[in-house]
């Protein structure tokens, strides 16, 4: 930027004119005008080589600006700038809404006549508008090739019988329906029958595409099928249309559905290296999974198609033929495997379906196929026989070990109980001796130890019992004890054999009622007998018989041999 100044200078009455020029300094960058870089839309029908938009940038220093498309931007190939200083962007190739609906573009504005080459960049968004350039197509759409938005129209099929009329037909693979190829416009469509309506026998709804059978078919042999051509056209442009084929087949009346003769089949396959082996059943017969249809005289419906559902179940290991034969890839199977397959039979005419299950067992090499269900149980019982036998033997051993353990414990307890019972006899608690007030039991275990007595008993004339250690003594001179609460009575049962001895102090007779008086231990007493048999702290008891005889018994605490006497009587006495 430059300017001029005019000055007048007085100097010694002289005048001079001075011209000062200010030079421009390039210190500013160019800037885009905001309104030129806003997102904008362009139709996909825009012609190639036409200007689609323009951009504008200014520089405060007044430098010349040129515009460049950054080729690193994603969609730079769609545009070009023919005149760099104009800012006009030209479409370089056609746009397609069905392929891409939005474009991104980078444009750089830079100084053209400066050394510094200051520049700035703007990111532009271009939205593509859908144009009416596509034709309608029927659904479901089958693309001609991947990536190409062109569909192959399906063939619609329906089945009717001779007795049907005034019926809305149900088609396969779906209802008759079409849509506009321009999804952004979604123009309404109109349906019509171009040919094959058989003079109004079939009528179509122009808005929904439903076809109705208006009158019945008299003879299916004369008219086994009808072929219709249905057109779907845009309502605003009838020249944009599409045509589909509709096939209506006339069937005989279906009275019986197809049925399998059983719901579960049993199959066997022997493990081998064969890539294809036929599944067999009991008796090594070929397994046939077939249905019967009573609508046919021989029961065989030629329109039945077999398949395995879902396909992922077989995983390529099994295949079913249209004759109902199952084939397996034996090299991929392992012995003792089991697979459950579901076979589906579909009547292609009536659309009816029925299914059955197949239980397949994989046998090991050389293993025969069972002849029947019972033989199968024996077969797999033999296979697992060793394992089952081992488990059974283990349980038997455990049971015998436990039984032996309990028997040993019982024997040991009985052995430990015998000395306790002998000691209980001494204390008067043997279960074979009971009180007079309780039920009386036998005394089979009562006995004397004859070795406790010496020869002095026979030679003594005093009428006393003498033992070597002074265990038993009978004194005739003792007086009957006075009755008191501490006394008790007991019935002593003599079984006969236990007390029959020349040393028996009581003759064998009927049970006697004896009065028993328990005396406190004596601190010191000398028993009749040898001096070496003296015992200190001896407990004595006096027994009074019904015949007036009195017997006094001394108990040696250091010996367990004693007469079997059980005391009972007053329950309140602690001496019983």
Image (cartoon, helix red, strand yellow):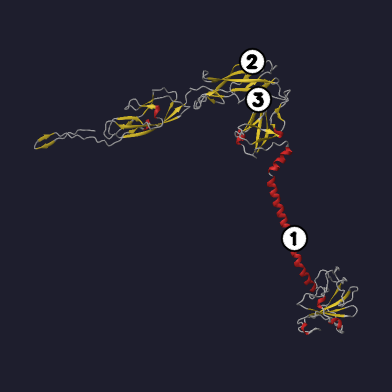
- Residue in the foreground of this view, choosing between 41 and 72: 72
Q: Where does the image place residue 124, in percent across and percent down from the top left?
A: 39, 32
Q: Nearer the viewer, mark 2 or mark 3?
A: 3
Q: Quadrant of the N terminus?
A: top left
For label 2, the SS is: loop
The answer to whether any part of residue 268 appears in the image is yes
Disc 3: which residue: 348
Q: Earlier in the sequence, mark 2 or mark 3?
A: 2
Residue lying at 27% horizontally and 34% vertically, measured from the top left: 61
Q: In the image, is residue 49 above or below residue 424?
A: above
Residue count near mark 3 (Cα–Cα under 10 Å), binned few <14, some 14–19, many ≥20:
some
- Quote the CA–CA distance across marks 2 and 3: 24 Å
Residue 198: give its label: 2
Residue 270: give its label: none
Q: Is residue 344 left or right of residue 117?
A: right
For label 1, the SS is: helix
Q: Earlier in the sequence, mark 1 or mark 2?
A: 2
Q: Is residue 241 left or right of residue 268?
A: left
Residue lying at 69% horizontally and 16% vertically, measured from the top left: 221
The answer to whether any part of residue 481 appears in the image is no
């Amino acid at each position: 930027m430059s300017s001029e100044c005019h000055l007048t200078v007085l100097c010694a009455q002289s005048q001079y004119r001075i011209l000062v020029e200010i030079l421009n300094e390039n210190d500013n960058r160019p800037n885009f005008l905001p309104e030129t870089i806003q997102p904008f839309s362009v139709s996909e029908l825009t012609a190639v080589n036409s200007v689609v938009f323009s951009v504008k940038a200014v520089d405060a220093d007044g430098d010349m600006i040129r515009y460049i498309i950054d080729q690193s931007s994603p969609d730079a190939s769609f545009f070009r700038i023919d005149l760099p200083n104009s800012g006009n962007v030209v479409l370089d190739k056609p746009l397609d809404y069905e392929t891409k609906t939005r474009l991104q573009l980078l444009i750089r504005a830079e100084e053209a006549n400066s050394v510094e080459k200051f520049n700035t960049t703007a990111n532009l968004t271009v939205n593509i508008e859908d144009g009416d350039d596509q034709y309608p197509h029927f659904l479901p759409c089958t693309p001609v090739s991947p990536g190409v938005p062109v569909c192959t129209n399906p063939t619609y099929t329906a089945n009717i019988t001779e007795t049907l009329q005034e019926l809305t037909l149900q088609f396969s693979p779906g209802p008759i329906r079409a849509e506009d190829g321009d999804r952004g416009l979604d123009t309404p469509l109109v349906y019509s029958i171009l040919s094959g309506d058989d003079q109004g026998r079939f009528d179509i709804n122009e808005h929904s595409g439903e076809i109705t059978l208006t009158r019945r078919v008299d003879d299916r042999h004369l008219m086994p099928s009808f072929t219709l051509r249905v057109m779907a056209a845009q309502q605003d442009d009838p020249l944009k249309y599409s045509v589909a084929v509709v096939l209506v087949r006339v069937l005989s009346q279906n009275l019986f559905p197809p049925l399998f003769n059983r719901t579960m089949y049993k199959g066997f396959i022997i493990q081998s290296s064969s890539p294809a082996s036929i599944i067999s059943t009991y008796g090594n017969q070929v397994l046939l999974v077939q249905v019967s249809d009573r609508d046919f005289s021989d029961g065989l419906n030629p329109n039945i198609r077999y398949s395995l559902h879902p396909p992922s179940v077989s995983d390529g290991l099994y295949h079913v033929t249209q004759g109902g034969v199952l084939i397996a890839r034996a090299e991929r199977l392992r012995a003792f495997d089991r697979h459950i397959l579901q076979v589906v039979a579909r009547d292609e005419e009536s659309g009816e379906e029925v299914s059955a299950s197949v239980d397949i067992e994989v046998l090991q090499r050389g293993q025969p196929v069972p002849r029947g269900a019972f033989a199968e149980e024996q077969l797999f019982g033999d296979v697992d026989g060793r394992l089952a036998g081992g488990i059974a033997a283990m349980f038997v051993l455990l049971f015998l070990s436990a039984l032996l353990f309990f028997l040993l414990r019982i024997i040991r307890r009985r052995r430990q109980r015998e000395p306790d019972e002998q000691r209980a006899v001494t204390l008067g608690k043997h279960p074979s001796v009971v009180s007079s007030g309780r039920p009386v039991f036998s005394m089979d275990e009562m006995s004397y130890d004859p070795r406790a007595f010496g020869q002095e008993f026979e030679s003594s004339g005093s009428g006393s019992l003498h033992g070597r250690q002074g265990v038993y003594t009978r004194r005739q001179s003792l007086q009957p004890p006075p009755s008191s609460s501490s006394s008790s009575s007991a019935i002593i049962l003599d079984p006969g054999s236990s007390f029959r001895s020349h040393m028996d102090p009581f003759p064998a007779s009927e049970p006697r009622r004896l009065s028993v008086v328990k005396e406190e231990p004596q601190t010191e007493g000398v028993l009749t007998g040898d001096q070496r048999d003296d015992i200190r702290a001896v407990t004595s008891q006096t027994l009074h018989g019904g015949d007036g005889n009195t017997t006094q018994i001394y108990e040696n605490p250091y010996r367990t041999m004693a007469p079997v006497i059980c005391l009972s009587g007053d329950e309140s006495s602690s001496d019983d």
